[in-house]
Image: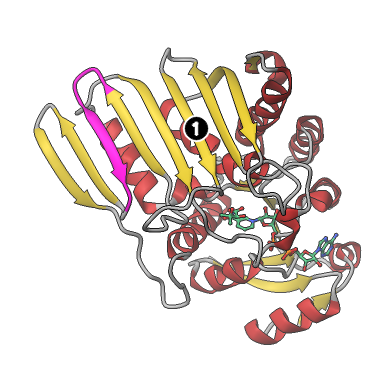
Amino acid sequence: MAELKGALIGCGFFAINQMQAWRDVQGAHIFAICDRDPERLKLVGDQFGIERRYTDAAAMFADGGFDFVDIATTVASHRALVEMAAARKIPAICQKPFAKTLSDAKAMVAACAGAGVPLMVHENFRWQTPIQAVKTALQSGVIGEPFWGRFSFRSGYDVFSGQPYLAEGERFIIEDLGIHTLDIARFILGDVASLTARTKRVNPKIKGEDVATILLDHENGATSIVDVSYASKLATEPFPETLIELDGTRGTIRLQQGYRIEVNGSDGVRVTDASPRLLPWASRPWHNIQESVLAIQQHWTDSLSDGGETSTSGADNLKTLALVEAAYESAASRRPVDIGAMLR
Ligand code: NAD
Ligand code: 89V
């Protein structure tokens, strides 16, 4: 079967990882790129040897010649670009945060469904090796039915040097990082019925909140905590590791710093190393995220080829984005928020 041809829009900080991963994906490659900033376009075009370059996405769609589009821009442009892809019946990948509001995201899902084209959100954290290993351990049944969980990302890492826009928005950690942690909580313990959240801003140099604590009531009766912080100065910096605790009726699972998984289950205690691979183009400490970029892009390519639904489809991601909106709403009102009502 012929390789799928992709076009990437947004040649910024994170797109470098996506471009590197596309070179490793089996069955697809990037054929055209677009960035409204000519300098970024040149830099990425030269680095990856891409001849077809555009500063205007509409012009790139008009020329066509590609099978899917990978939208790697920041959130402000996501709705317009996804709708442009739907209008041309081009399958689309869209970076997280999927949209600025849940109502924009619902419109984007409806546009792609109406056009009959697949839409996947580039929600890569659930594709990390340690997260997949925790899911596999839970699904094996050794800890019985999970009734409690904690999904924790606490760090003092300077994310602002690579992504300066993160310091400027009214919203920060829930929208940018907590969105991944909330998605992991859904991936591991299932969908959420309601939540309660508290936020804080500790770093005076940024506009948004950099600490959030969120209590989730899952539809299956489990309770979990999602806690995220960029204001935690630890002796050994854990960025970008998500730590997980799960208690079940027959045992426990712990994903600890250093990618160590300890399972105390019905067949005794098992300790495994769930370290991600250091891909040839990757660098520490980002290698965990970089490996998951390759995994999600391979998943997209395989799904597009065999007609399967992606794990983080637009429709699935509405349920993650609803948690983000609900967390801000709950932090402001100091009340629990019903998630079902937001998704109806
Ligand atoms: P960035 O600002 O460095 O890059 C965005 C690029 O898109 C810029 O070069 C800009 O010129 C271009 N652009 C914006 N609107 C455009 C448009 N309409 N047409 C053409 N080009 C346009 O941002 P970044 O840090 O690379 O982040 C991009 C996205 O990736 C964000 O949504 C961010 O949340 C996400 N991200 C995801 C992860 C992850 O692990 N999944 C990690 C980092 C960033
Ligand atoms: O995944 C992200 O969106 C990144 C980071 C991990 C640094 O928060 O912004």
Looking at the rendering, the stretch of residues picked out in magenta corresponds to 248-257
Task: Identify the element where label 1 is drawn.
Answer: strand
Counting the numbered discs, the total is 1
Q: Under 8 Å from ligand 2: the CB of mark 1?
A: no
Q: Residue at x 70, y 13 (%)?
A: 341
Between 209 and 49, the one nearer to me in the picture: 209
Reading the image, the residue beneath label 1 is 226
Kind of residue sitting beneath label 1:
Val
Between 313 and 225, the one nearer to me in the picture: 225
Q: Examine the structure image and report whether residue 173 is included in the region drawn in magenta.
A: no
Q: Is residue 295 above or below residue 19?
A: above
Q: Examine the rendering and report whether any part of residue 311 can be seen.
A: no
Q: Residue at x 81, y 35 (%)?
A: 104
Quadrant in the rendering for residue 166: bottom right
Image position of 337 (left or right of 280): right
- Find residue 21 and report its horizontal and vertical position in percent: 53, 68
Residue found at the far left of this picture: 268
Between 104 and 284, the one nearer to me in the picture: 284
Quadrant in the rendering for residue 5: bottom right
Q: Quadrant of ligand 1?
A: bottom right
Image position of 119 (left or right of 170): left
Image position of 211 (left or right of 238): right
- Find residue 262 and report its horizontal and vertical position in percent: 21, 41
Quadrant in the rendering for residue 50: bottom right
